[in-house]
Amino acid sequence: MSSQHAVIIGGSSGIGLASAAHLLEKGYRVTITGRDETKLKAAAESLTGDVAAIAMDAADLTGLAKTFETIGPFDHLVLALGGGNGGGPLASVDLADLKRGFEQKTMAHFACAQACLPYLSKEGSITFVSAVSAQAALPGTAGLGAVNAAIAALAPILAVELKPIRVNCVSPGVVDTPWWDFLGEEQKAPAFASFAARTPVGRVGRPEEIADAIAFLIGNGFISGHTLICDGGIRLGQ
């Protein structure tokens, strides 16, 4: 697989960084992007293999075409952009915050997929990273669910529209990544324990497990238009 080039948008931490490491181990050439140049440089230095790093803000739609022109031809796009705007009960959710959620995650996924098309191999793939809030029907996540369901909806539509390019989506559950650092350790531990108790596998996920799901979809040439839910079963509502 050493001739294959994967571009990971949001590759400087969490699921994106784990995906970069996983694909590099498989012999892919990898380019990672991120907004924070210092963080991005540290991420690239932590990886082993044929890796490049390009600073970009995927929510800055005006610069996407130039970024993909700089990257040049490649084979696989992974959109591992985080987002947490729009959470809360329907009655009190901040609509401006929800709008930011769509702009920073849904629109960024959509715009990156659009901007990459002149450079993406026709034998290649696009893999979106959504979230299980789109499937789990958890109270207080209507906004988050809407943002992520919109992303998951792209996979089957684009699989047909962009054929033979394969388009899939991974929908992670609760995963121990830096996204949760806003809680602080004292709050994060009991939150994870609560999620683990509601999850059939009895724990939260690891970013490497989501990376493995992403690599599977990239590598399997007979899967397209599919959303792979990798959530430990939390959507089942225990």
Image (cartoon, rainbow, N blue to C red):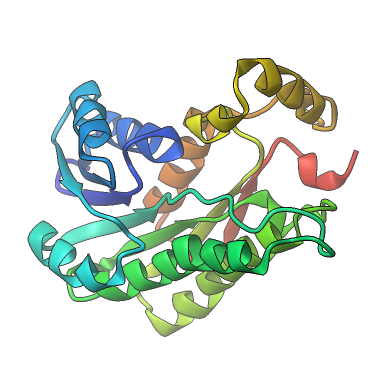
Q: Quick one: 200 or 70, which is closer to the camera?
A: 70
Q: Quick one: 204 or 214, which is closer to the camera?
A: 204
Question: Residue most toward the bottom?
Answer: 161
Q: Is residue 168 above or below residue 46?
A: below
User: Residue 30's x, y, as percent?
Assistant: 21, 43
In this picture, residue 84 sits left or right of residue 3: right
Q: Residue at x 68, y 50 (%)?
A: 132
User: Residue 209's x, y, as percent?
Assistant: 53, 32
In this picture, residue 1 sits left or right of residue 19: left
Q: Quadrant of the N terminus?
A: top left
Q: Is residue 114 above or below residue 212?
A: below
Question: Residue most toward the right?
Answer: 238
User: Residue 31's x, y, as percent?
Assistant: 20, 45
Residue 223 visible in the shown view: no
In this picture, residue 65 sits left or right of residue 214: left
Q: Is residue 55 above or below residue 65?
A: above
Residue 55 visible in the shown view: yes
Q: Residue at x 35, y 75 (%)?
A: 164
Q: Quick one: 201 or 223, which is closer to the camera?
A: 201
Quadrant of residue 163 within the rendered picture: bottom left
Quadrant of residue 142 within the rendered picture: bottom right
Q: Quadrant of the C terminus?
A: top right
In this picture, residue 52 sits left or right of residue 204: left
Q: Residue at x 24, y 22 (%)?
A: 46
Quadrant of residue 91 within the rendered picture: bottom right
User: Residue 158's x, y, as percent?
Assistant: 46, 77
